Image (cartoon, rainbow, N blue to C red):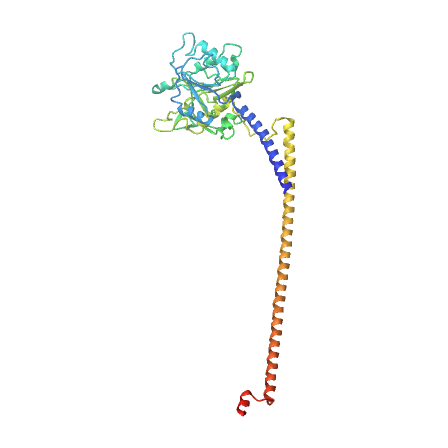
Amino acid sequence: MKSKKITYTLMIILSLILLFQVSINLINVNAGSDYKGKNKPIVIFDVAHQQTFNHTQMQSAIQAIEERLEITVFINYDNFSLVNLQGADLIILPAPNLNAIQAPDSESPFSVIERRALFEFYRDGGSMLYLANPYFFEEEMRNYTSHANYLNYMMSSGGQDEVDYGGLSIDRAQITLMNDFNNRYDDERFIYINNDSMLTDHSILQGFLGTDSVDELLTYSTSIDTLFAQRLINTSVTTYEVNADGEVQGGKTQEHTILASNEIEAYDSRGISCASAIMFSDLAITNTSSDTWFEAYDNALLWENMISWLLFEIPEEEPEIQLPPIGIFAASIIAIFFVFMVVGSVLFTIGREVKKVEVSETIIEMRKQDAQRKKVDKEIEEAYYAEDDVEEELKEEEEDEKEIDMKSISDEIKKKPPKTRSRSERRRRN
């Protein structure tokens, strides 16, 4: 019993030590998985520059990332500055509409000061998501057209880093992509894309831990003109361009990039350009259908993966189980714990088996003694009753013999004549 208590005590103490060390390691892992050491990232969705697709049309997309990432998306109604961008981690920047009013000192609704502030934000480790949208050449749909060149203006820093940020630029031509073969809803503009034209080894497409891979998409898109960024999603080779007047451009079909990413390690910043904002909106795909673009195929999943990647979500692959980096002393403690645990388990198992054997032998011996005791008791009882029977038989024999003697004596007396007369007879004679 004493050895058992000692074993239990050692196992409890070592278990507490291990749990303490593992808890420290888990705390470190959780801190590292946060956005650059922060508990929650700060995400800004800009609507201050006459955007075609604002937070109203993209309400489901905003709500989706708030629920999945447990963050709050702040809607920005003011011009960018070093003050209101301070502390932000990600800016979602939809393109202004085609007829947006330009700033006095700029080629776009974004001022020179805003462009510089956004450049400093990007160089300070912030992430950017640029959302363009194609030109609608139908007159009644012209109000959804975005101006891609306005985004290109914000990507250009005007300095030596222009190549880094300009790598995400949108095609300067106001075009809409068409595909006569790979389309849906009987509309050549509603292009269907599967993973045949995706760079599937990127985490935005293959997914993170607990998420699925992006396999199918539905887009209504313009094109990204990039030389330096990483192309992630292309259309099929049967895609062609149509200008604002509905005229085919270039006279040929080819692949077009609709999603590209860029990561500048020197600044620890990331950026994504997407040539279609409508594919993440709550707008109905057609006038006769209640299906929205955000709900189509894997559009919502792609949106969530883009935001996760821009917020530096890791890991991209299932991590291997490794010894926590908690020092030689802690590693030694863990090793000793496992040794004690194994030895203690073996000793405990052996002790338990030995105890079982001892208990079994004791029970067997007690059973033997009990059987022997019962046997002796039975013999004593039989002997006692046998002695009583003998005495009764002897007594009965003595009584029988006594009766026989008395009878014989009586018979003898009857045979002999009386020697004297009775008193009555003497009286009569006198």
Exactly how many numbered labels are in the figure? 0
Q: Nearer the viewer, residue 364 or 163?
A: 364
Up-down relation of residue 39 to residue 8 (above or below): above
50 vs 147, nearest the viewer: 50
Direction from residue 324 to residue 186 in the image, left or right? left
| Residue in the image at 60% along x and 72% along y | 392
- Image location (x, y in percent) of residue 169: 48, 16
Q: Nearer the viewer, residue 273 or 29?
A: 29
Q: Is residue 308 visible?
A: yes
Q: Position of residue 313 (x, y in %)?
A: 52, 24
Q: In the displayed structure, would residue 377 be above or below residue 61?
A: below
Percent position (x, y) of residue 255? 48, 23
Q: Residue furthest front?
A: 430
Q: Where 415 falls versus 7 (above or below)?
A: below
- Quadrant assignment for the C terminus: bottom right
Tell me which corner region of the image, top left, top right, bottom left or bottom right, holds residue 283.
top left
x, y percentage for residue 5?
62, 40
Does any portion of residue 279 appear in the rendered image? Answer: no
Q: Most extreme residue toward the top, as rendered?
A: 105
Q: Quadrant of the N terminus?
A: top right
Q: Is residue 55 left or right of residue 413?
A: left
